[in-house]
């Protein structure tokens, strides 16, 4: 047995002794035996033939060998190896059934322009192929269009060069599966013949590098057979230079996709197309990707979850093609032109400050991850929330029943934020029946935000079907007209269905408007940084289960337009910068803090049960910073020496005992807790509610008493020597700003005998973020102050004065605005000079330019703004001022 085994081993060894490695000796014909030597540098043995079993032929680096006739190499045990930097060109066929090896950097040209048989063209691929990742095979000529490339090969770089006709379109029937490097399809001849990956068979192809098309035609899938899929993953970028990339015609998504992780470039009249909307081009990289296209991308496009795509050019999509964003798209100033298909931000982020032309299409933002579902399409009830950040330009829809803007979907959240003069307009081409056909739907607890100068206009309906509507314009929710954030001509159903929430978020004075819902089922949030705050124009009730959120700014109410909170509603926030200025009503049996104040004085009141209470108990609280004796007299009883002349509260409601807690502030004038009492006016005199519990200090504390009846309440004192209960707060009498050349001069006056410590001069360029400029020390009994020397910059400059009392209390003046005009631009005349619906400005300009025109009132506030393109010389600028109230105004060019 051992002898037999030894014989087998020795036999195997003896066979290997006859295998010889030969090296090329230069850029010679490989067909010649003298072109080879057993030594790399020559001088040793040359082969006796090319058919010796097991021989290895190595083309050395730097050598370029071209066949001059057919070349047959050994048998299945032989090897042909091309080293890095070496070239082999098969002008005549190479017959090889052994191993064909291309090392990294090696190149093989499959030319076959000599006279060959039908089988000779593929003969070099008759054995085993081992192609390194950076090796290159270039097919310059093939037998015919009915013979596919060999299957099962892991190609390095693969180049298909159409030098001449191969008889027709060339379908690979799914034979290509792995290309480790780049895949290049190019045409250097005149034949326009497609290279096709597959027809109705499944395709799963991985390309490790770039996909490059140069003057050639690449078709991914020829047929449209149900149940088959074609997935091509390009780990590099895609470049189409003068050729055509055709994704084919399929009717299933997402099973037919061309995916890429690098950049996407189309130039030189390159074409990207598909025969239906279902094949998708998919960006799925993990790093930043860039898109640059000189023409229409006539196929659907998806940005996968986690991908980041930046547009370096306009993106124009073909008819009915979709653009799906599950990752991040930064369009910047590059417009997107849709062809009537859908733009859906499905769990992704879409940022744009350029035009988006939807035509007769749907723009939707919702939850998801970019996956398609037959019943919910691209939206889902889970996954990331889609976000659209849009500014400056216009999302434009045609006036058509097919034009839709959808923020969210059923159970699916989305966010659309429109800022910086952004516009959503349904004013494109008219198609179909009568106007007012586009729709805007807010659904699924989604978020639709419009800042101060952003609008929705044109022929459309608005339906609030649940979600957050954030408003920045002053007029609030109006039912008609060209005012506020909504200026559409169709019906405005702000509370159409579902649970709707509203936020007023602005640096401008705001009003709720004549169409604000009377009952809030969701959240009513106030985030207003203007001095005037938000004014109710109708009574508003916060329903049970709903929320009032006082984040920033005052809410002005009155007895007719009162803010009410039902039992079971919730109040969040409330502070010295967020309170109700006017009466506030609350129903219910539990303790509640009324965040009320007036004239920048915040004086909340807490009512809590004192014994029995009922679910229908209702109280209304309003704060007044003034002397109650001017209204109710000064008839004092029960050992009260004096009452406050600084403030009082009017509390009315159910005659049920309550504990009432008042806030003590610096302007309350409290100096001594032991002699401090609560005082209630019973209709004839001020009664003593005695000394309750106190907390904190005499300038920042609280005072609680028990009351059985309700009406006016204030602080009282049982001693003439304590608790002055009066204050002399700073009161601004005037404030104005004027120009002195290119600088600003500010003047302000205050009432005499006040408690000012210092004044802070503040400036802003956007009327939102004010920064300190200088500090002016207050001087006792001085009432008039000024500050000068502030350099103006072109445009609108905003100023205000902050007064700081010695108690720490602060007070602001109104905002004044100064406009520094743009040099070289002058408004010659406004015609007519009395404002009508249409006004014309005659404007002279020293150059061709674009300018902004501002209309300000006598207080310097901007009430209207527009932009216009000016020609050198005189230009007529027409403006519509139908929304401007009668008054005195000034035009400015910047």
Image (spheres, rainbow, N blue to C red):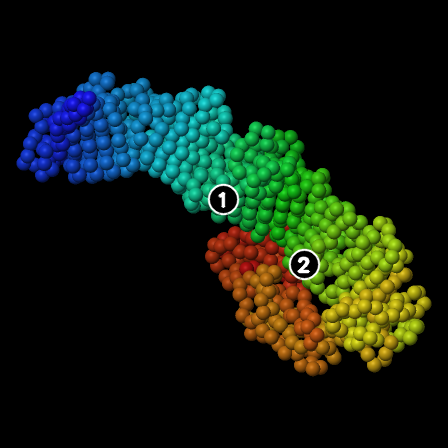
The tag on residue 328 is 1
**Left of 266 or right of it: where is 90?**
left
User: Label 2 crowding class (10 Å Cα cut-off): few <14, some 14-19, many 20+?
Assistant: many
The answer to whether residue 667 is above or below residue 398 is below
**Left of 691 or right of it: where is 122?**
left
**At 7% across and 30% down in the image, what residue appears?**
46
Which quadrant of the figure has residue 80?
Answer: top left
**At 15% across and 27% down in the image, what residue appears?**
13
Mark 1 vs 2, N-terminal side: 1
- Asked if the residue at tag 2 contacts the one at tag 1, i.e. Cβ–Cβ closer than 8 Å, the answer is no
Which quadrant of the figure has residue 457?
Answer: top right
Judging by the rendered image, the residue that carries numbered circle 2 is: 552
User: Label 1 crowding class (10 Å Cα cut-off): few <14, some 14-19, many 20+?
Assistant: many
- The number of callouts visible is 2
The answer to whether residue 177 is above or below residue 579 is above
**At 55% across and 62% down in the image, what residue appears?**
795
Q: What kind of element bears circle 1?
A: strand
Which of 852 and 714 lies nearest the eye of the viewer?
714
State how far apart marks 1 and 2 are (Cα). Answer: 32 Å
């Amino acid at each position: 047995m051992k002898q037999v085994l030894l014989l087998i081993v020795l036999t195997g060894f003896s066979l290997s002794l006859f295998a010889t490695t030969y090296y090329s000796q230069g850029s010679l014909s490989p067909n010649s035996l003298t072109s080879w030597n057993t030594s790399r540098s020559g001088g040793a043995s040359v082969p006796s033939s090319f058919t010796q079993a097991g021989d290895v032929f190595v083309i050395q680096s730097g050598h370029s060998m071209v066949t001059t006739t057919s070349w047959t190499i050994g048998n299945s045990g032989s090897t042909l190896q091309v080293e890095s930097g070496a070239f082999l060109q098969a002008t005549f066929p190479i017959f090889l059934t052994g191993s064909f090896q291309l090392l990294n950097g090696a190149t093989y040209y499959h030319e076959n322009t000599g006279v060959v048989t039908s089988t000779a063209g593929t003969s070099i691929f008759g054995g085993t192929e081992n192609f390194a990742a950076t090796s290159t095979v270039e097919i310059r000529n093939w037998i015919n269009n009915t013979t596919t490339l060999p299957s099962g090969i892991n190609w390095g770089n693969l180049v298909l060069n159409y030098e001449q006709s191969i008889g027709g379109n060339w379908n690979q029937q799914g034979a290509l599966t792995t290309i480790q490097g780049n895949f290049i399809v190019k045409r250097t001849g005149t034949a326009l013949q497609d290279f096709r990956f597959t027809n109705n068979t499944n395709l799963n192809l991985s390309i490790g590098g770039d996909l490059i098309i140069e003057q050639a035609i690449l078709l991914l899938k020829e047929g449209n057979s149900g149940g088959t899929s074609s997935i091509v993953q390009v780990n590099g970028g895609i470049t189409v230079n003068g050729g055509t990339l055709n994704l084919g015609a399929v009717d299933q998504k997402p099973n037919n996709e061309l995916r890429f992780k690098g950049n996407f470039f189309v130039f030189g009249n390159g074409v990207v197309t598909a025969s239906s909307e279902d094949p998708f081009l998919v960006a799925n990289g993990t790093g930043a990707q860039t898109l640059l296209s000189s023409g229409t991308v006539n196929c659907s496009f998806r940005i996968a979850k986690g991908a980041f795509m930046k547009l370096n050019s306009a993106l124009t999509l073909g008819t009915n093609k979709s653009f799906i964003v599950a990752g991040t798209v930064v369009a910047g100033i590059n417009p997107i032109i849709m062809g009537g298909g859908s733009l859906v931000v499905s769990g992704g982020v879409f940022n744009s400050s350029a035009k988006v032309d939807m035509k007769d299409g749907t723009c939707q933002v919702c939850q998801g991850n970019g996956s398609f579902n037959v019943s919910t399409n691209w939206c889902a009830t889970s996954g990331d929330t889609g976000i659209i950040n849009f500014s400056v330009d216009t999302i434009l829809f045609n006036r058509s029943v097919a034009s839709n803007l959808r923020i969210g979907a059923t159970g699916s959240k989305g966010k659309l934020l429109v800022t910086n003069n952004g516009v959503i307009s349904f004013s494109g081409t008219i198609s179909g029946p009568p106007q007012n056909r586009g729709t805007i739907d807010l659904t699924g607890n989604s978020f639709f935000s419009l800042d101060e100068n952003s609008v929705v206009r044109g022929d459309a309906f608005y339906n609030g079907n649940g979600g957050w509507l954030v408003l920045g314009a002053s007029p609030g929710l109006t039912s008609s007209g060209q005012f506020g954030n909504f200026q559409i001509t169709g019906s405005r159903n702000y509370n159409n269905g579902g649970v709707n929430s509203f936020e007023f978020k602005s640096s401008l004075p705001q009003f709720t408007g004549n169409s604000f819902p009377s009952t809030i089922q969701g959240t009513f949030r106030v985030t207003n940084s203007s001095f005037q705050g938000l004014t109710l124009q109708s009574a508003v009730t916060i329903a049970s289960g709903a929320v009032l959120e006082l984040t920033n700014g005052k809410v002005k109410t009155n007895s007719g337009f009162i803010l009410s909170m039902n039992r079971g509603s919730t109040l969040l926030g409330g502070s010295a910068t967020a309170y109700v200025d006017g009466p506030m009503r609350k129903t219910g049996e539990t303790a509640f803090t009324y965040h009320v104040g007036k004239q920048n004085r915040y004086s909340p009141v807490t009512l809590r049960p004192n014994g029995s209470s009922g679910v229908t108990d209702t109280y209304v609280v309003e704060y007044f910073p003034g002397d109650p004796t001017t209204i109710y007299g000064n008839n004092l009883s029960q050992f009260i020496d004096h009452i406050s002349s600084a403030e009082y509260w009017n509390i009315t409601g159910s005659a049920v005992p309550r504990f009432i807690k008042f806030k003590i502030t610096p302007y309350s004038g409290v100096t001594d807790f032991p002699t401090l009492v609560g005082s209630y006016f019973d209709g004839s005199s001020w009664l003593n509610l005695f000394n309750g519990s106190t907390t904190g200090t005499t300038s920042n504390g609280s005072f609680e008493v028990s009351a059985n009846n309700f009406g006016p309440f204030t602080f009282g004192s049982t001693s003439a020597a304590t608790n002055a209960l009066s204050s002399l707060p700073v009161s601004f009498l005037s404030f104005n700003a004027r120009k002195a050349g290119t600088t600003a001069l500010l003047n302000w006056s205050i009432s005499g005998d006040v408690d000012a410590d210092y004044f802070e001069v503040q400036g802003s360029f956007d009327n939102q973020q004010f920064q300190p400029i200088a500090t002016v020390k207050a001087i006792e009994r001085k009432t008039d102050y000024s500050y000068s020397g502030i350099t103006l910059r072109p445009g609108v400059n905003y100023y205000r004065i902050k007064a700081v009392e010695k108690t720490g209390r602060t007070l602001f003046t109104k905002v004044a605005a100064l406009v520094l005009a743009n040099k070289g631009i002058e408004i010659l005349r406004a015609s007519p000079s009395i404002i009508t619906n249409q006004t014309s400005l005659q404007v002279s300009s020293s150059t061709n330019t674009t300018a902004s025109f501002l209309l300000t009132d006598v207080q310097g506030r901007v009430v209207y703004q527009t932009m216009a393109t000016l020609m050198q010389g005189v230009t007529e600028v027409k403006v519509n001022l139908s929304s401007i109230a009668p008054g005195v105004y000034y035009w400015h060019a910047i």
